[in-house]
Each structure stands twice: as C-alpha cells, then as structure tokens.
Amino acid sequence: MIHDRLTRDLFAEICRIPFIDPHSHIDPRRPVSRSLDDILGYHYYTELAHSAGMDQAPLAADADPKERVRSILAHLDRIDNTSQYSWFLEIARTFLGFKGDRVTEKDADALWDAGQRVFRQPDWEHKVLHASNLEKIFLTNDFDDPLEGFDKSRYVPCLRTDDVVFHLDNPQVRERVRRATGIEPLDAQTLDNVLGRFFERFTKNGAKACAISLPPSFAPRPVDRGDFSRALAEFQTEEAGAAAGYLVSHGVFWALAEHCRRFRLPFDLMIGVNRAVYPGGVHQGRDLFDQRTSLIQYAELFNAFPEVTFCVSVLSSGQNQELVSYCWIFPNVITSGHWWYSNVPAYITQDCRARLQAAPKTKQLGYYSDAYKLEFVLPKYNMYRRVLAQILADDFVRPGVYTETQAVDLARMLLRDNARRIFGV
C-alpha cells in the first residue's frame, strides 16, 4: 500500500507506461493459465509450501490438480508474510474476483471454480495483456524450437543456449542438434556451422537476443581450435572425461559470443546459479546462488567482445555492487532485472537505488518477470513499479534532482525505451 501522494501519483503514471518484458519462460502457444493449478504450480509456491512443511505427494504428476491446489492453499498461512503470497493475492483479486483479505484453504473451491470460468474465456489472453499494459515479452526458446504458431510481434524469440554449451556430451542433445541443423558437431568448424544455422534461423524469425544461465565456477576463455576439436571428438566415444567437457563448454560459449558479434545480438548472461544444491527439493526448487561467483571471471570476455552488449543478471543481491561497477566501467555491460532470490522488495529497493545512483540510466533494463504464465506479469511488475515509484519520489523528486515529469521519463527508460534500443525492437 502506498500512502504518500507523490509516490502514489508516480506509481499511477508509471503503470500507464507500456513496457517490454525482456525475459520470461512463457509458452507463446499457451501463454495464459488454464486452471488455478497453473498459478499455484509455479515453483515459488511449491518450494515455499514444501519448505514450510507440505509433503511432496500432492506435487506428483499424476496427483489430482484440484487437490494439489487445496494442499498448497492449506499452507499459505505459513507463507503469507512473503512477496510471493502477495503476488497470488493480487492475481486472485485482479483476475478471479476475490474480495477477502487473506486466502485460505476455505477459499479453494471458490477460487478453483472462478479459475475454471475465467481462464476459459476466449479473449482471456487479450484481457491479461491489457490489464498488465504489456507491449512485448521475450521468450526462452531452445535451439530446436520450431518458432512457429505465435505472434512474434508480441512474443519475441530468444535463443537459449544452456544445452549446447553444457550438455553436448549427451547423445540426445547431439541428436537434437543434428535434426535441427543436419550437421553433426564433430570439430570446431562443424560446431561453428551448427551455431551459424541456429543464429540464421532465429534472427530470420525475429529473435533479438541470445541467453544462457551460468554456474558459479564458469570463467569464459578462448580455447585452441585443435584442442576444441579433439574434445568434441571425444564426445563421440564413451571415454570423454571432465577435461573434454571443460574444453567443449568453454569453446562453445566463446563461439556463441563470436556469433553474437557477427549477428549483432545482445548476449544475456544469468550468472551464479548452483544447480541441485537440494536434490530432495521440489521441481525447480533445488537451485541456489553461490557467493564464490565474481564478475572478474567475465572480464576477459567483456574485453574481447566490445561490440557485443552483455545484459547481465546476478543471482544474489550481494553481487549487485560488482555488477553496478562493471556497468559503470564497461560500455558493453548492462544491468538486467532483479533475478530469482533477489526478486523481493527489500533487495530490489537497495539494488535499484544503487544502480540509479551509480550507473548510466541508459544502461539499465529495469525489470523482467521471469514468468511462466502471463497472469504473473502484472503482480511482479507492480511490485517493481511500487519500489521504483518510492525511489523516484525520495531520491529524485523531493530533493529537486528531477521534476515529476522527468522522474516518469526515467521510469519509461527503464521499463521500455532502453529495451527498445538495446534489443532493436
């Protein structure tokens, strides 16, 4: 709730800005929810409920969706202090007609029935887009995604490259590469040809970025082409070891940066996720950040490719100062969003404030939803917009640095104009 008039007015004006969401996991062929299970099945709720004591049995694939929803709702009273709960409450109020102050297990049937009614409206996607004021949203597309059957003027393709960098040792991934390109990546040259096919197809279909999620230990560096070819050849046998995997992942990554330069695509780097820290966790609730990560690991990359724009997300708020400093110094480093474990108001406030105080305003992508369904875009962006309105009021308008109009112009830059320029949309 916003209490002072200035912040409330700024928030209202910011909400009128059509925005571009530069990172999501939306399926453009099924962008909106079909039941309340699509909402509460989001990993934030399953992992929080599990952490607070819920058994994993209701999360099984063959479990009844309505009962899964009921089980999660039964644990909401344990997480109603969280930002994630506030997202769900805003969805329930905005889209499902909920009038109460708190959602409990007693509301399960009414909310389920409302979802069945509302989500099946033939124009539901349009209504959600309109309510959110969303202009464009970027996707996360595997290299073999067909890129067909959706509106690319609204849903912007983005080439996600984790599999080809880190999993080429998997015969299934290599087979997917072969089917997608007609080429077997046997050496450095054929790998270049594979990546060329990827980039040609994606850019012809309107892709505006390449993206990857990177582990804490990864430190990009160029690899000798002979060593790279020999390591790729090892992948055709059952004797490939860790050394080959290291050379291939670094060789492919460096080649991706070269193709981003060639095709003039920004490279989104999502840095610091340590996978499967909690193997017993729920689906998508097993990964955490790792404080050992430093952007000094990427300095050679940033220096080697001054023509490539690197849109960088860091997983921990504690690394934000380092990211701000790199954006401050490197012309090709952009701050991008507030990712995952940093995506709560306490961290957004300090991180956004630091960015606005220290880094060029033209080099900041204010926020992205990381959403799997469109219904989450509104509450997540409203969370960010409230924080941004408060920062603009306290740090810019009240001290006389900006007028209210100039403050709104800055918000427009963070939410729309920078994305349009950086990605060329």
Image: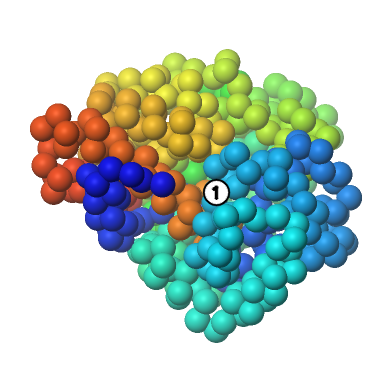
- Above or below for 96 versus 201: below
Residue at 29%, 35% (x, y): give it. Answer: 391
Residue at 50%, 37% (x, y): give it. Answer: 344
- Above or below for 198 versus 347: below
- Above or below for 120 versus 33: below
Q: How many numbered markers are drawn?
A: 1
Q: Is 298 placed left or right of 215 in the picture?
A: left
Q: Report the coloring of the rendering.
A: rainbow
On-image quarter of the C terminus: bottom left
Q: Quadrant of residue 278?
A: top right
The x, y position of residue 422, in whole percent, is 29, 47
The local secondary structure at tag 1 comes to: helix
Nearer-the-camera pick, 353 or 4: 4
Please name the residue that numbered disc 1 is placed on.
86
Nearer-the-camera pick, 368 or 29: 368
Q: Quadrant of residue 248?
A: top right
Task: Judge whether residue 247 can be spotted in this image.
Answer: no
The x, y position of residue 2, in whole percent, is 36, 45
The x, y position of residue 374, in whole percent, is 52, 62
Nearer-the-camera pick, 336 or 142: 336
The x, y position of residue 240, in whole percent, is 78, 29
Residue at 52%, 26% (x, y): give it. Answer: 316
- Crowdedness near tag 1: few (<14), some (14–19) or many (≥20) residues, C-alpha within 10 Å: some
Q: Amino acid at mark 1?
A: Ser
Task: Judge whether residue 39 can be spotted in this image.
Answer: yes
